[in-house]
Amino acid sequence: MFWFDFNWQIQQLLNLWWWPINLGLLGVLGLLGYFAYKKPAYAVGATLIALPTYLLRSTVWLVPLTFLELCIWVTFFGWLFGSVRQRTLTANHLYRYRAPITLLLAAATIGMLVSPDLRAAAGLWKAYFVEPILFYIVVANVAAEPKGRNVVLWSLGLATLSVSLLGIYQWFTGFGIAEPGWLSAEHRRVTAMFTSPNAVGLYLGPVVALYAGWLLAELKNKKHAALKAAVLLLAILAIAGTSSQGTLLGLAAAAAFLAFFGWSKKWTAALLLLATVAVLALPATRSAAWSLVTFRDPAGQNRLELLRMSQEYLTSSPSRFLLGGGILGFAKIQNQLRDPLRLEPLLYPHNIIFNFWLEIGLLGLVAFGWLVVIFFKTGFQRGVKKDWLKLGIMAAMVAIMTHGLVDVPYFKNDLAVLFWVIIALLPNETLSTRN
């Protein structure tokens, strides 16, 4: 059975319906297995809608598992058995990424073995690397067909609704916000079912970028365009309630990417220049922008301190430079180096480069960078002008990478899965040129 890992207000509400919820979850797993075997696209869609259910936790044969993890395993094995029986199993979808994936899994395994907490690291190793990659294999197969791809895309939109609607409700009521400091109307920052406002932005931001591209791709279909616009509007409202600077930075970069490659390079550059001049011309906006760029605000100072600690640790010995600190190692590192009066305890250094380097070593950072380079190289291979859906998929990755400069866009159950879904959605044009 499952227990709930939410803010006390949300948890108290869910506990009133503990038995019906648990019985319903078991029923969902049964249906998921059936669809994974018969119609895997719908199993993938249901698993995507269930992304926030990593907060529903259980233990199976002494192994800690979340409901999301169980959905992934059921979907993968149902699809695998169905593919073997129907003799449709193929590894062609892995062609582009097989080398960086192999390297990434090897680095993650090493990161697990050198971790200061092997048992906890093993759980994150499966949740952040093994399971998302297995799910990627299923999504890549499903999304290879237009119908399956549409199921995945619509499911991503549905996956935002629980977070968006709860976030908007919190913005007006304050119900279920994770920290008391974010409750007051003047300083309210929504957290949905998560523990921080940034987690909302990290979850919603890439889907907003993707849906913006998809909306532009199918504007003539008014019914579908209205539904996509509704998903976008709700997600943007929830993001506004977070006051997350990293999310806004990521979305701004994604919007610039869409405009530059899908609309006009000259006009986009001109508008960016005009916006920069406008910001610098006004003393208030100039001061705020300078504070952000130079990391002089409190959040920026914390980021600089995290970067300093990361650099200090990595350069302290050759083994640390190569291996990092192991999965979950940064928590121990920063507790030894931080000033408790200035910096709260954190699990990661809040920079995508140092996140990977410290967790799974230099090899893991190289593998991740290699993966992202192949992703964009593939996306640009046959041109992107007016291919708004492809641009939207790539813009989602731009949002992740940009937000990742100041946050942790991968090392979380739902975000790791979302990252690999975006990888899987990019059309496999490299493969089509080989066939």
Image (tube, grey):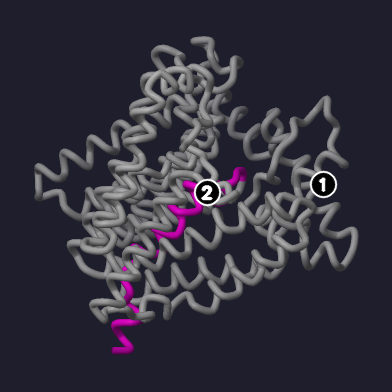
The residue type indicated by label 2 comes to Val
Comes first in the chain, label 1 or label 2: 2
Where residue 149 sits, quadrant-wise, is: bottom left
7 w.r.t. 305: above or below:
above
- Tell whether 313 sits left or right of 188: right
- The rendered magenta stretch, by its main secondary structure, is classed as helix
Q: Nearer the viewer, residue 67 or 233?
A: 67
Residue 339 in the image: x percent, y percent? 85, 32
Which residue in the protein does label 1 denote?
Answer: 333
For label 2, the crowd category at 10 Å Cα-Cα, with few meaning under 14, some 14 to 19 and many 20 or more, is few
Regarding residue 292, the answer to whether it shows in the image is yes
**Residue placed furthest toward the front:** 61
Which residue in the protein does label 2 denote?
Answer: 60
Q: How many discs appear?
A: 2
- Tell whether 221 sits left or right of 316: left
> Quick one: SS at disc 2?
strand
Q: Nearer the viewer, residue 362 or 124?
A: 124
Q: Residue at x 45, y 56 (%)?
A: 397
The residue type indicated by label 1 comes to Ile
Boundaries of the magenta span = 406-435
Would residue 221 be counted in the magenta stretch? no
- Tell whether 110 sits left or right of 420: right
For label 1, the crowd category at 10 Å Cα-Cα, with few meaning under 14, some 14 to 19 and many 20 or more, is some
Q: Nearer the viewer, residue 390 or 427?
A: 427
Where residue 368 sits, quadrant-wise, is: bottom right
Would residue 433 be counted in the magenta stretch? yes
- Residue 64, disc: none
Q: Residue at x 52, y 49 (%)?
A: 60
